[in-house]
Each structure stands twice: as C-alpha cells, then as structure tokens.
Amino acid sequence: MRKKKLTGLFFGSFNPIHVGHLVIANHIMEFNHPDEIWFVVSPQNPHKPKETLLDDYTRLELVNLAITDNPAFRACDIEFRMPKPSYTVNTLVYLTEKYPERDFALIMGSDNLETLPAWKNSSEILRMIKSIFVYPRPKHDGGSLKNDPRVSISCAPLMEISASYIRNSIKQGKDMRYILPAGVYEYVKKMNLFR
C-alpha cells in the first residue's frame, strides 16, 4: 500500500503574508518533513473591520507571489467556498474526503495549541489529523496538549512580525521591502495596497 502524503495546513488571513510566515513554514518543512505545506487563506472574518482586510483573492494572490519559487508550498482557497464562519473541523472533513491519498497535519503557534481544546469539535479535529507542528509564541507553552504524541513543538525562530505593524507602516509611507517577500512587496507597491 502506498504511503500517504503528509500535508501541513498553515491557516491564516495572510493580510499580508510576510517573511515571518515563510520562515516558520520553511523551518517546519526542514525539521518536521511534511511532503507539502498548504497556506490556507481564511476568508473575510465577520468580526474584523472590512477596511483592514484585503479581499480574499488579493490575499490569495499575495500568497502565490510569496511561494512561487517553492514547489512544496501551495496556496489553498478551499475556505472561500465553504459556509461562513469557517471552522477548522469543517475544512478538515472536506479535505480528508476530497484527498483520501493524503494525511493532514496542522501548523499553529503555541498560543493556538493552548486554545485548541475549546475549538468547535476539537476531539474530531484531533481524530482526523496525523500531527500538529507547533511554533513558539511568547508567553505560551502550548497548554494541556503540549505532551500529546501527535504534537511536535518546534524550535523555529521566534518571529515577532505582525501584519498590522506592516499595514500601519505602509500607511505611513515606510519601506517594508525586507519584511515582505520581493514579489509581495512589488505588488503591494504597484497596487497601492494598505494606503
């Protein structure tokens, strides 16, 4: 029987995607060895003010520009076509049915691992996934799930880059060329985004 491909799911609004996201994904790839990482772009959150969030397809385009040179990375728009709000459990049900030849792993910060037991149908999420690759977040140790055998706590570099910092800096006319991947930086500049 053929071994299933292990696919890491990195969820986010990616508003915009930045080098911090790519450093984390690259670290997970190199040290945890999934076959692929899918950047799952989350759709408009009804609790976030619309003016702070670029539209879904612009954020998807930015992810595609950021990962274009890495064949193991893929942008995923699966949640665009799902009922809102999108719950991780529903996305996993859909993906496991659509891609039976794959096993899925979640990629998340230690802050999210702490809250995972309170997520909708968290026991079902844990049943469906093969692994959870966790990157460190300040002042969060991962909580009650950190010793679960599926959890792998990574020593990825601590990346304290926030998308809101990037957006506010661009709004003030600051140069963000070293915090954004080159293609993303050029597109943001050309399209006058976040101004």
Image (tube, rainbow, N blue to C red):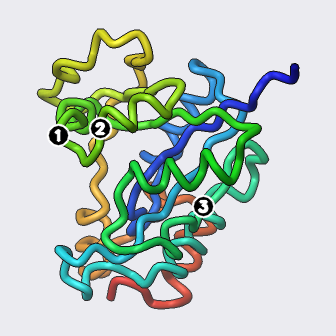
Kindly check if marks 3 and 1 are in contact, taking CB atoms under 8 A apart as contact. no
At label 3, the amino acid type is: Cys
Q: Where 100 falls versus 95 (above or below)?
A: above
Kindly check if marks 2 and 1 are in contact, taking CB atoms under 8 A apart as contact. yes
Q: Which mark is residue 118?
A: 1
The count of marks equals: 3
At label 1, the amino acid type is: Ala
Q: Where 32 falls versus 38 (above or below)?
A: above
- Which image quarter is the C terminus in? bottom left
Write down the residue under mark 3: 76
Write down the residue under mark 2: 122
Query: Is disc 2 surrounded by few (<14), some (14 to 19) or many (20+) residues within 10 Å?
Result: some
Q: Nearer the viewer, residue 163 or 12?
A: 12
Kindly give the residue lying farthest to the right in the view shown: 1
Q: Nearer the viewer, residue 138 or 170?
A: 138
> Residue 80, how many percent across, how many down?
50, 74
Mark pair 3, 1: CA separation: 25 Å
User: Is 137 left or right of 35, judged from the image as shown?
Assistant: left
Mark pair 2, 3: CA separation: 22 Å
